[in-house]
Amino acid sequence: MIANDLRRMSKLYIKALGQFLPPPHSEFMAETMLLVACSKTPVTVERLIYHLENDKRTVIKLLEELVTIGYVSVIKVSSVKKDDQIVLTEIGRQLLPQIQEAITLTEQRLKGKFKEIDLKAFTDTLLRMENNLKPY
Amino acid sequence: MQFLLSKKFQRLTRLYHTIIARDLPELPFDNLIEILLVIHQRLTNNTHTQFAEILNLDKSRVSIHVEYLNTHGFTKTEINPEDQRQHLTFLTPKGEAAVAKIEEVIARVNKVINQDLSLVQLNIFYTVIRQMEHNLLTNLD
């Protein structure tokens, strides 16, 4: 099944990325930090759950971890948890270049000496496969 | 904003499994399907440890899945007479029938996923994915 190949690749990618990322070395941390840093509008917990494509409990736990280690802080805007807004702390902002660098290094490692044309063919095929399955 | 490549892989994996699972409601988790296929293809002696290695899963998770398959009559697990520490899992007739259906569904979904893609494109895709895997594996601790 192609899904097995993709899942294995995904796990390997995450493991490789974790070697370069600052603690807690998780891809969820990297995605959260990048989303908050790049977003032009406030990132709420609800938006983060949607972005990470994960369940609420897992995302809240991750968020609490990031708050504890001082990368982000949470601003309460209503009594509803999902409306809480996430902002980067000074420590979190300082980590952004390291996170970007970690992604770049991982992708360099992943791509190795591939020709650009083959990589483009690969990503085009990946996209085509996704589009083929979507209507079903 | 930079998106992680793993995200693209995960999205396609999820999509693929969602479609397969729709046609196999009696097997609600993709790992159940994979374990049945591994047993059917006789890739191992069918111990939990070997399933965990092949499928890259925790042994505890494999145990939960095998328990599910046994309880629902797809497999049966017996103690290996040659090594009492090992538990071997086999397909039951219900499991054999499920594998036939799984293969039929996978063939159908593969046809859909490969729609409008030439053999050359697919060859490049699989060559690149194998090489990427090799690139990552050789550099991992």
Image: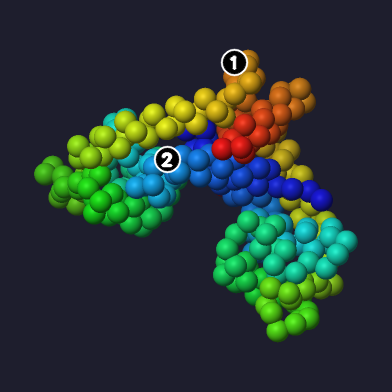
| Nearer-the-camera pick, B124 or A78 | A78
Q: For label 2, count other residues whose C-alpha is less than 10 Å away and answer few (under 14), some (14-19) or many (20+).
A: some
Q: Among all residues in the image, which is located at the extreme right?
A: A40
- Which of discs 1 and 2 lies nearer the camera? The answer is 2
Q: Among all residues in the image, which is located at the extreme bottom?
A: A79
Q: Is residue A32 above or below residue A67?
A: above
| Nearer-the-camera pick, B58 or A123 | A123
Q: Residue at x 39, y 42 (%)?
A: B24
Q: Residue at x 25, y 34 (%)?
A: B96
Q: In screen coordinates, is B23 left or right of B4?
A: left
Compute the Cα span from label 1 to label 2.
27 Å
Q: Which residue is labeled 2 in the image? A: B23
Corner quadrant of residue A94: bottom right
- Could you tell me which chain the residue with mark 2 belongs to? B
Q: Which residue is labeled 1 in the image? A: B119
Q: Among all residues in the image, which is located at the extreme left?
A: B81
Residue B109 on image: x %, y %: 50, 31
SS of the residue at dot 2? helix
Evaluate whether residue A29 shows in this view.
Answer: no
Residue A55's disc is none
Residue A36 on image: x %, y %: 80, 63
**Circles 1 and 2 on the same subunit:** yes
| Nearer-the-camera pick, A34 or A82 | A82
Q: In screen coordinates, is A125 left or right of A75?
A: left
- Disc 1 to disc 2: CB gap under 8 Å: no
Residue type at numbered disc 2: Asp
Residue type at numbered disc 1: Leu
Q: For label 1, count other residues whose C-alpha is less than 10 Å away and answer few (under 14), some (14-19) or many (20+).
A: few
